[in-house]
Image (cartoon, helix red, strand yellow):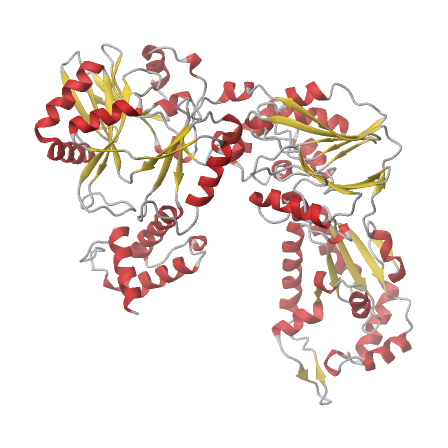
Amino acid sequence: MRILLLMRGVPGSGKSTFIKEQGLEPYTLSADALRLLYASPMLDNAGRWCISPHFDKQMWPFLLQTLEERMKRGCFTVVDATNIRGRDMTAYKKLANEYKYRIYVVDFTDITLEEAKKRNLLREEYKQVPENVIERMYAQLADNKVPSAITVIKPGELSQIWYKPRDLSAYKKVIHIGDIHGCYKPLKEYLEEINPQNYYIFLGDYIDRGSENAEVLQLLLQLAALDNVTLLEGNHEANLRDYGLADGVASKEFRMQTAPELAQAGLSRKAVYNFYRKLSQCFCYTYQGKKVLVSHGGVARMPENLSLVATAELIYGTGVYEDALDVDMSFAKHAAANEYQVHGHRNYEGVPTEVNEHCFNLDGAVEMGGQLRALELSENGFAVVTIGNALEYLDKKKGANGSKANAKIENVQQLLANFAGNPLIKEKSFGVISSFNFTRDAFYNKAWDDVTCKARGLYINKRTEKVVARSYDKFFNLDERPETKLNALRHNLQFPVQAYVKVNGFLGIVGYDSAQKKLLVTSKGDMYGLYAKIFKNTLAAELKERMQLLEDFVKTNNCSVIFECIEPEMDPHIIEYRKPQVVLLEIIENELSFAHRPYAELVALGEQLQVEIKEQACTLTSWDELQAWLKTIMQEDYLYDRKHIEGFVIEDSRHFMTKLKLAYYSEWKRLRRVAEATLRHGAVKAKWQLNDELSREFYQWLQEEIYPLRKGDGTYAFATDIISLRKRFEERNSCI
């Protein structure tokens, strides 16, 4: 927990011995130990071994830097140093204030000077301090006081600082409320009023994802002042801290959604920050013989000393996000008969509120259309309460594929009006036909709404106001958007779910404009550009005389036929293919709202055209089945049909779609960026891209064996796409 323990006393006063006796060595930053990192023991003028003082200018900043890193995680920390001068504690106070730490000084100044000198001589030779140094430090004690706001304790009073469970047995009920995530309506439905006879514990994650963040925060600001309410800190409350400090918030979701809601409601940054400061790291209590640990993330066993547990572990939980069920099983295994834990934050497995007889999980994914979970403890035991969420906020903000609800745009005329002058939409004109696509800014800023999601390979005859060719609406990767996170999928997918193999090429669209009696063969928002030509040539080469059949099909059915185009020589991607080809992906109606023909019709058309059809990998009939499948395909060494693929597209029974990129593809896509930077500049600036052994080995190989072959004009005499480089790299490794 956020406790900083400072030892204070002259050398030989017993500080290090005390730390060892109390079992605090794993939590200690020792000034002498850090000095020994900079230099080995040295001989003094008298021929005695001693710790070198020559690197103190480097050691103290290093100690403070290390301390700050521990404070970021909320680690209980002991600083073993003399800490005599009051001004030396200013740096500690500054860090403690920033990271919500309490500071205690353990006072060893009662020892006499003679006793300190005597003990000094009993230490290992290299740890002994010259007597004149001890005398000088001892004299400084009289002139230096411990600054205010720092609590001073004696060594025998250490037990006073440890966290002690609070007895709540006098209350009628203890009520625990799980992750709220900006969903005010279900919270208010459950919490009509605060009963002074009950005690209320909120488990954190009050904001983000929902659309009623300001309402939730305004209510909690009122409750924070009550004696029978404890508000815990969740991981999303870090956004409130950063917002309150005006340092800039890393979370784009908070900046784009939550922050404007707070500002509109008149919640000042100062008020927000003061609220964050009041949040507790955890709460442990007893109730009529039961001992209950409440945290945001959940831990693997009841700690013997809660104060020694890092705040980060209490907030994020033991292990990683996916480990929640294992952690709860471990807690139950180690728990005494009367010990329980309550947590939220993570529910990857989709477990019920009562995970087992000792553990309760209050993450009900309320913000994803799940439930607000509450747990009530009374003399009758534990009782679970759930409140459903109607997903009204999702309907307000996003549709099935991450866009705003389609109700506002009912026809092409309205859509064109929304496109007009929109800086996030680019239009290309081909006579009376225009193509519309989202811009780079829309993509990189994730500015997804009904308009930008619709503008994806959309071709409209502006004279007739008819869709003449179109692709998919924009849809998103697994875990990329709130609606594609596992918690959301668990609650909102409609089974059965189909999984299709994702081909690694580029999209080509075939449509027909009946007004001009014109076949449209397009790609990347262009009818005549390079990719359109590549697609047209590849399609013609594969279909030959059957091209007329395709034209007749799109003309008769008023639809677009979507292909994935693969051209290994002219357009290599990540996955290697042997020859140019097209893969039939979809038959999409030329309508404003996305709708496609059944897979059986796609197969029938593919057989007529004699082209490869997207492969249906499997049908998943339940969440458990989907989850087991995900665990399999996400493994690093996963192969589909004995080969690497980009990933899968999954589609549920209401045509909600999401993409799954596999580990091999994602890894080599990242290494492609490494290769591009290295071949251009000889190095990469973003060293975070070199976070594993393969990346570092590949980077070193590029620097030593490929970049030196760069010609004067900046080009290379051989292919430098990632597939070609990967082959050279793997062949080189196979010869070693």
Q: Nearer the viewer, residue 305 or 380?
A: 380
Identify which residue is drawn at 63% across, 44% down: 316
* Residue 78 placement: quadrant: bottom right
Identify which residue is drawn at 65% across, 42% down: 297
Residue 152: % across, % down: 86, 56
For the C terminus, the quadrant is bottom left
Q: Spot the residue most to the left.
A: 545
Number of marks in the rendered image: 0
Identify which residue is drawn at 16% across, 26% down: 608
Q: Is residue 319 left or right of residue 468?
A: right
Tell me, yes or no, if residue 331 can be seen here: yes
Q: Is residue 538 left or right of residue 29?
A: left
* Residue 497 placement: quadrant: top left
Residue 126: % across, % down: 72, 81
Q: Nearer the viewer, residue 9 or 661?
A: 661
Residue 296: % across, % down: 67, 39
396 over 121 or under it: above or below: above
5 over 396 or under it: above or below: below
Residue 363: % across, % down: 63, 33
Identify which residue is drawn at 32% across, 12% down: 412
* Residue 566 placement: quadrant: top left
Tell me, yes or no, if residue 482 can be seen here: no
